[in-house]
């Protein structure tokens, strides 16, 4: 018995060693296949059917009909594409500039820096759904503190989130509060890893603080800035929690906060139009790939 | 002006000349330096204030009675715990917190078990395509996966079960684990690993006994971030959770619908959801920033 055990054990070990790639990757592949690849194909399939109502209902192949109705939908779909681009473009631009400023501000060591960094971390770790609810109270037109503060400066009470013409701007503000810290901390980590010498050289050559930032620090920090923007870009295009907790189904009564994310969620889970929603998701995915791909191509060209 | 500034830290020969120059003008730089310091201190204070004041405001509101919340100009009030008892006891938020905890722990644990070996192989054999695939997973709109999951889970009778929620939350944590751990394993000590194999360890043995124990800080980073992202996830629970499996973020959303006017309760609920995460972040700040940066350079 003992000799037998001793003889097969090395064989198993050897097999495991030789197939370590397979053994280590297999569980991840199974999960990724089951959770991502198959569902994605399923969504592509749904997009050409009229699936709606109950999940068990038989659905029929209808070709590109869903896509046609989407790209001609000037009431909801096309405005939601525009809102997605608007929310991301304005939000990420403002956040990038602010984050860079904060990172530069916190760069040199000072007393209490750990405390400051921890405070800055708080908005981004706070549960986004709770953040949405929080700001709902702050921007409440009659009892919110935002109008109270506006009053101190003689500004008439505003509708903020509840006023369709101000909704997106207010929500971009909240998004900026929530996510600037993430970019700032990534950039700060990048700044702290930069070598001191080039800055020192520029200083000795008489460059002003502003010149040093523009001509020395920012070019050196470029890869980190791009990485932070890329990360934020992906997340911003898919913002859901903040928009849905503050405005609910369909982005509010006149769809004022309906981005692609909210549109595709609402069509499927608020109105059970699964086929239409799947088609919008296909277009949405294409848009994301174009934007992210374009951004990465631009980044590559810049580094050459 | 620039010369005198240079005198503060410069080490070169030219800087020595500027030091002498600076000494001839003793007043200017010190005043400037102090002004700069005050300016910087003020700016830092503003950043901290802006980050924290909305959170503090909500924390304060959670101890107010609704009468006091509707008067934002009134600063003094009699604190009450009724919002918390209302949320925790009457509205079952204690139970939802346990659901959130269970799902986040299970999803994070499973993601670590599945993702760490994969990350190791990705790093060891420099599998760029696998890394790109993980990045690809991040850009997919989650709703595009949620609809098929919903169809499948309905047919399997799994909607509203912990199994469905944990599976969906693995999608949140797994890409994170692979991204962070593969960059961690890329900088591992290959010689130590090889020495182990010379001494008779198998490839898997050396991974288990040498590489993995050294990687504990990386694993901790993944565990913390995975837990936070899973705890904070709102979208999946909104669709896949049932009455017994509701997580905190989904519960607060339903809370708005039922008791839209109970602002005190809502704020207490927001505090109950966020406070555990903030405590984690406070004590483990270092790991979170490190993990984010690793994830950033990877993705």
Image (tube, coloured by chain):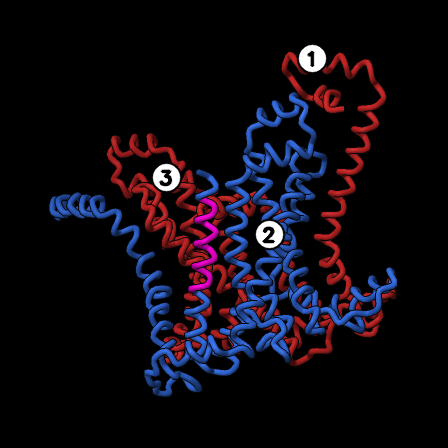
Q: Position of residue B221 (x, y in %)?
A: 50, 47
Task: Say left or right for B130 vs B262.
Answer: left
Tell me what hue chain A is rendered in: blue
**Mark 3 surroundings within 10 Å by alpha-carbon count, few (fewer than 14), some (14 through 19), many (20 or more):** many
Question: Considering only order in the chain, which callout, 2 or 1, is on the residue closer to the N terminus?
Answer: 1
Q: Chain of mark 1?
A: B
Q: Is residue B190 left or right of residue B59?
A: left
Is disc 3 placed on a helix, strand or loop? helix
Chain in red (letter): B
Viewed as shown, does residue B88 lie left or right of B299?
A: right
Same chain, marks 1 and 3?
yes
Circle 1 or circle 2, nearest the eye: 1
Residue B29 left/right relative to B106: right
Residue identifier under label 3: B211
Question: Sequence order check: which comes first, mark 2 or mark 3?
Answer: 3
Q: Chain of mark 2?
A: B
Q: Residue at x 76, y 68 (%)?
A: B81
Residue B280's mark? 2
Tell whether position A290 is magenta: yes
Residue marked by disc 1: B16
């Amino acid at each position: 018995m003992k000799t037998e055990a001793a003889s097969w054990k090395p064989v198993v070990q050897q097999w495991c060693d030789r197939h370590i790639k397979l053994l280590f990757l297999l569980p991840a592949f199974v999960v990724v296949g089951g959770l991502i690849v198959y569902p994605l194909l399923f969504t592509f399939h749904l997009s050409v059917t009229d699936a709606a109502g109950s999940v068990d209902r038989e659905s029929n192949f209808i070709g590109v009909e869903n896509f046609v109705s989407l790209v001609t939908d000037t009431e909801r779909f096309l405005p939601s594409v525009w809102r997605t681009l608007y929310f991301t473009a304005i939000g990420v631009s403002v956040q990038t500039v602010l984050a860079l400023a904060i990172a530069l501000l916190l760069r040199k060591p000072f007393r209490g820096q750990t405390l400051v960094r921890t405070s800055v971390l708080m908005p981004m770790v706070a549960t986004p759904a709770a953040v949405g609810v929080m700001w709902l109270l702050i921007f409440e037109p009659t009892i919110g503190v935002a109008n109270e503060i506006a009053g101190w400066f003689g500004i008439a009470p505003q509708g903020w989130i509840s006023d369709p013409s101000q909704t997106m701007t207010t929500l971009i503000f909240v998004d900026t509060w929530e996510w600037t810290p993430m970019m700032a901390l990534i950039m700060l980590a990048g700044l702290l890893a930069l070598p001191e010498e080039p800055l020192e050289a520029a200083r000795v050559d008489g460059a002003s603080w502003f010149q040093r930032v523009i001509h020395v620090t920012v070019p050196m920090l470029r890869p980190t800035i791009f990485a932070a923007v890329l990360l934020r870009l992906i997340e911003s295009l898919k913002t859901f929690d903040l928009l849905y907790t503050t405005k609910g189904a369909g982005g509010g009564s006149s769809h004022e906060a309906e981005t692609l994310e909210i549109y595709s969620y609402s069509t499927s889970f608020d109105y059970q139009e699964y086929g239409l929603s799947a088609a919008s998701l296909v277009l949405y995915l294409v848009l994301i790939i174009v934007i992210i791909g374009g951004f990465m191509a631009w980044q590559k060209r810049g580094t050459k | 002006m620039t010369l005198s500034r240079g005198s503060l830290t410069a080490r070169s020969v030219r800087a020595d000349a500027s030091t002498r120059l600076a000494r001839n003008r003793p007043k200017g730089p010190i005043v400037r330096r102090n002004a700069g310091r005050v300016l910087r201190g003020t700016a830092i204070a503003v950043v901290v204030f802006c980050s924290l004041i909305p959170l503090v405001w909500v924390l304060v509101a959670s101890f107010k009675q609704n009468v006091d919340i509707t008067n934002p100009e009134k600063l003094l009030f009699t604190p009450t715990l009724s919002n918390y008892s209302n949320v925790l006891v009457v509205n079952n938020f204690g139970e939802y917190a346990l659901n959130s905890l269970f799902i986040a722990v299970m999803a994070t644990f499973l993601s670590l078990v599945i993702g760490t070996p994969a990350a190791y192989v990705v790093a060891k054999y420099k599998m760029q395509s696998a890394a790109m695939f993980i990045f690809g997973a991040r850009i997919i709109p989650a709703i595009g996966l949620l609809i098929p999951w919903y169809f499948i889970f309905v047919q399997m009778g799994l909607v509203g079960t912990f199994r469905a929620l944990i599976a969906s939350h693995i999608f949140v944590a797994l890409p994170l684990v692979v991204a962070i751990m593969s960059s961690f394993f890329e900088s591992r000590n290959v010689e130590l690993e090889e020495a182990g194999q010379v001494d008779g360890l198998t490839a898997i043995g050396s991974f288990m006994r040498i590489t993995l124990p050294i990687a504990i800080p990386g694993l901790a980073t993944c565990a913390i971030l995975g837990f936070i992202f899973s705890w904070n996830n709102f979208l999946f629970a909104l669709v896949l959770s049932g009455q017994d499996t509701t997580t905190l973020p989904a519960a607060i959303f339903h809370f708005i619908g039922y008791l839209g006017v109970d602002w005190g309760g809502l704020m207490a609920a927001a505090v109950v959801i966020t406070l555990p995460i903030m405590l984690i972040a406070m004590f483990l700040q270092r790991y979170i920033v490190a993990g984010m940066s690793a994830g950033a350079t990877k993705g």
